[in-house]
Image (cartoon, rainbow, N blue to C red):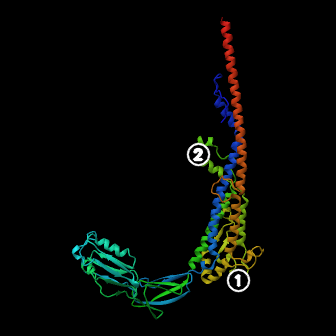
Amino acid sequence: MSSQLRISGFASGLDTDTIIKQLMQVERAPLNKLNQQKQKIAWKRDTYREVNAQLTAIRSSVDKMRFSNTYNKQTATSSDSSVVSVTASSSATSGGYTIKVNSLATSALVTGTNVSINLKDKVSAADIKGNGEFEIIGKDGAKVNVKITADSTYESVLKQVNSANIGVTMSYDSINKRFMLSTSATGESASIMINDSSGTADSLLKLNTPTVVKGTNASVELNGQVMNLENNAFEFNGVRFDLKGVSATTASVSVSRDTSNIIDQVKSFVEQYNSLVDKVNSLTKTVPNRSYNPLSDEEKEAMTEKQIDLWETKAKSGILYRDDILQDTLSALRSSLNSSVKGLSSEMDSLSDIGITFKAYSQGLTSELGKLTLDENKLKEAVSSNPDGVMELFTKTSSLDPKDKNYQSESGYAERLYNNLTTQINKIIKRIGTTTVSDLEDNSQLGKQIGDINDRITTVENRLKLVENRYYKQFTAMELAIQKLNSQGSWLYSQLGQ
């Protein structure tokens, strides 16, 4: 803070602060220009980041298309989903099955007799026998020792059993007024036994099973072969069968390649690519409006938020006009899609063979140039007749060194696109860095430019402080001189008056 004495209009009556502020507005013109340059760089960074996010999203889609498992997804259908539902994994093989469900696997179940109670009530002391303990034994000997006292409630008894995690659940059927025990597991290995030497379980809960109660296995005929299963689900050749009900006749299951998945992948890519073309063309072909520059803080104070938004929208337009990286991105992607894939059959070695072509020129529709068009019927026909050929078109790899000039021509389209997108994404990162703070200094190209501008801003601000102090010093000297003249004038006036 300056220690310089500032006398504002004391003798002259002038509004010195306002005059100096107006003078400094002129002096600040170079500083405002530097701040505008810095803001434009920050806007550039933001716009580059938006494009990079779009490129990354396309690369993620293309990355999936590089691998055969994307095209080898299988779909399974059941002729009777009330008997069996089916799900195919990526390892499933195409084929057909017949299945007949003779019986479903059941859990072990123990059902008590009538006990009319409220779960919140305390247990009846008269029904607690001996030490008030009994044991529930589940599968593989897992057991819980249930302890009951006069302070217990029926609900607390249920909680003791259910929190023991022995694979046995106790519940109360409020409709039929009875307690029940059931196993989470099914099949003959699922079991329940109550060790009730005190007689409390029988007296209090009306549950009694002196012998082991077991579940039952499912009986299934798959392609005529009988299988006994402990569960109501099994896997075979990469297909999961979930048994739903008993059938009097056989149901059929068919497994085939999911060609709709391939079509959806290709359609999604075409849509993403065309969206990118729109974005890049909009950014690189919009001419900057030189009449609109970033606003200073003083200018923003005089405007509404809506006015500021409208102004900045115009100021940002054309921020990447004729940008070299973005133009090169479209050029590289277009080049990778234009040429055929060497080493494949001529019947299926280019995108046109599956209905993808670049849009032809149409008068008045220059914005459509560079976009892809998709003949969906041709794509469906190609996928249906030669799904492996379509897969190779995108997934083929080259044995050549990636630096070899022929590497790209021998690679499938997904591999080409993935490599080109990675290159362009890295170019943008080199230009803007990885920061999400738009005006941060870093080692990126734009980050270094911001650092240089910050240094120049500091130099100008220091100079402006000196200029402002000089103005105040000059006006202070003027005020003191006027005050001195006024004093001398008063003295002369008094002398002449005498």
Q: Is residue 485 left or right of residue 205?
A: right
Instruction: Establish if 278 lies above or below 163.
Output: above
- Circle 1 residue: 345
Which residue occupies the foreground of this view, 158 or 288? 158
Residue 13: % across, % down: 63, 23
Q: Amino acid at mark 1?
A: Ser
Q: Amino acid at mark 2?
A: Gln
- Circle 2 residue: 307
Is disc 2 placed on a helix, strand or loop?
helix
Q: Is residue 243 left or right of residue 363?
A: left
Dot 1 crowding, Cα within 10 Å, few <14, some 14–19, many 20+: few
Q: Is residue 220 left or right of residue 313?
A: left
Quadrant in which the C terminus appears: top right
Quadrant in which the N terminus appears: top right
- In which quadrant of the rendered view does residue 266 lie? bottom right
Instruction: Establish if 129 lies above or below 306.
Output: below
CA distance separating discs 1 and 2 = 60 Å
Which numbered disc, 1 or 2, marks the residue that appears first in the sequence? Answer: 2
Dot 2 crowding, Cα within 10 Å, few <14, some 14–19, many 20+: few
Residue 448: % across, % down: 72, 54
Residue 158: % across, % down: 32, 74
- Residue found farthest to the right: 405
Q: Residue at x 67, y 10 (%)?
A: 493
- In which quadrant of the rendered view does residue 496 lie? top right
Which residue occupies the foreground of this view, 225 or 453? 453
Is disc 1 placed on a helix, strand or loop?
loop
